[in-house]
Amino acid sequence: MNITQAEKATRFRALHEQGGAFVIANSWDAGSARILAALGFAALATSSGAAAATLGRRDGAITRGEALAMAQAITGATDLPVSGDLENGFGDAPETVAQTIRLAAAAGLVGGSIEDACDVAEAPRLYDIGHATERIAAAAEAARSLAFPFTLTARAENFIRGKPDLGDTIRRLQAFERAGADVLFAPGLPDLAAVRAVCAAVKKPVNFMVAIRGRSFSVAELEAAGVRRISLAQSLYRAAMSGLVAAACEVRDLGTFGYLDAALTTPELNELLCGE
């Protein structure tokens, strides 16, 4: 089935408006996108961390062009709606962020997230709330100028950028909501009480990131707390690489191949990838 970008965008927006929460699975290439689609996920997202890792780099160390090329490979591999992890918009200026949104749409994405922080000499820095809000406003204006409903997610990075201040996080999310964000996201919230506080403080759907040990909760728990979208960040890529490391260590250290017993067969993999 081939559907238009506008149809994908409408489907994606509708997922946020239905009752309950849905899981958006993060892929890192066309193959992983096809597998996740075959497993029945309703929508996909890219992951900046996974995208960087596939190039042998740390999170945040890829260019806008590289990120969007990977996103285009994913959007071309499936009919599912795909949202992009657009980091901080690949620049400080609101105009740069707006251009990133337009380029993301051109790459086939129907949504994308913008962070309120940047990396300076390896040290993360939060933008002040005024500048961060201007950047989201510019992104929202660019999104509204498109021919389809691009879903803009605004991220408040406090809890993963060295400022675990729930009050400031909520103030930022409320400002981003007023600036036109469609979805709100504060990665790294420490517990369900904080999740409930965020969800209660805003009217737009809230995304929760499952990826951090001790700070990840079940779908049922998150749904009860008010979350409407659950993303998986780099966790599926890390799980895949954990399998690679375990298998390779078995061969290196034991000279055995027991990992084959649990691995997909070639026909099973082909079925997921190509429906063959």
Image (cartoon, rainbow, N blue to C red):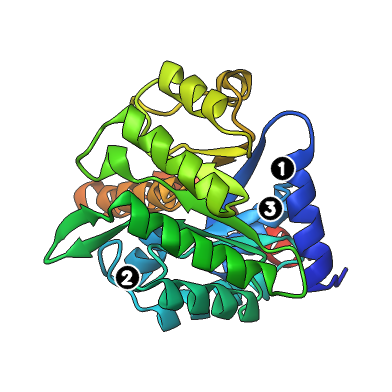
Q: Is 252 left or right of 67, judged from the image as shown?
A: left
For marks 2 and 3 on the same chain, the one whose residue lies earlier in the sequence:
3
Question: What's the CA distance linking mark 2 and mark 3?
Answer: 29 Å
Question: What's the CA distance linking mark 1 and mark 3?
Answer: 11 Å
Query: Is label 1 in contact with label 3 (beta carbons under 8 Å)?
Result: no
* Secondary structure type for disc 1: helix
Mark 1 surroundings within 10 Å by alpha-carbon count, few (fewer than 14), some (14 through 19), many (20 or more): many
Locate residue 58, reporting x and y percent: 25, 63
Task: Identify the residue position indicated by label 1 in the image.
Answer: 16
Q: Residue at x 38, y 49 (%)?
A: 238
* Secondary structure type for disc 3: loop
Q: Residue at x 41, y 22 (%)?
A: 194
- The numbered dot on residue 202 is none
For marks 1 and 3 on the same chain, the one whose residue lies earlier in the sequence:
1
Disc 2 residue type (three-letter): Asp
Q: Nearer the viewer, mark 2 or mark 1?
A: 2
Query: Is label 2 in contact with label 1 (beta carbons under 8 Å)?
Result: no
* Closest to the observer, 220 or 123: 123
Q: Is residue 53 above or below residue 4?
A: above
Task: Identify the residue position indicated by label 3 in the image.
Answer: 43
- The numbered dot on residue 92 is 2
